Image: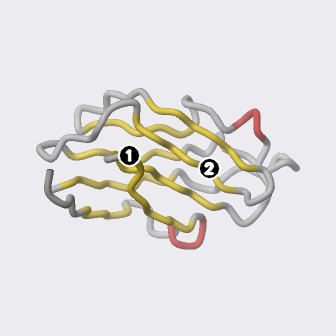
Amino acid sequence: MGKKFLNIQSTSPNAAGIVKQDLKFKTGDFLWKVKFNIPLDPNTVNANNMYVANSSNIPLKTSIRYDSVTNQIEIEPAEPYSTTESYYLHITTNVASRNGQRLKEPVQVQFQFY
């Protein structure tokens, strides 16, 4: 299998100020690493509040892990992404900090492999 190239677009004008995206490949699949600048309430880090969906807005099965030391979330797909599909990473305003502060606006990042 050849190298996959990634194209990313953010539909949130303030996304760069909310999250930093550190992109990495893991076992042939793409792994999102989203770092927050404050500690999160772990109860709000779940598949309802952050998920990856295809262009038909159907959520994919993913594994979500939160590291409270680094304030980083990893979102890993259960199966490889397709090169013929567009995907969206969604982070909703239900994600909150430990002190209850929620994101001011949702983050939506479109990406695809080609």
Between 105 and 68, which is closer to the camera in this rendering?
Answer: 68
Residue 16 image offset from top left, x and y in percent: 52, 72
Q: Disc 1 marks which amino acid? A: Thr
- Label count reads 2
Q: Disc 2 marks which amino acid? A: Ile
Q: At 31% across and 47% down in the image, what residue appears?
A: 28
Residue that carries the numbered disc 2 in the rendered image: 73
Say which quarter of the image contains residue 60: top left
Q: Is residue 78 above or below residue 66?
A: above
Q: At 38% across and 56% down in the image, what residue appears?
A: 25
Q: Is residue 34 above or below residue 82?
A: below
Residue that carries the numbered disc 1 in the rendered image: 27
Say which quarter of the image contains residue 6: bottom left
Q: Is residue 20 above or below residue 49?
A: below
Q: Earlier in the sequence, mark 1 or mark 2?
A: 1
Q: What kind of colouring is applied to the model shown? A: secondary structure
Distance, label 1 to label 2, CA atoms, is 18 Å
Q: Look at the image and tell me in which quarter the C terminus lies.
A: bottom left
Label 2, residues with CA under 10 Å away: few <14, some 14-19, many ≥20 = some
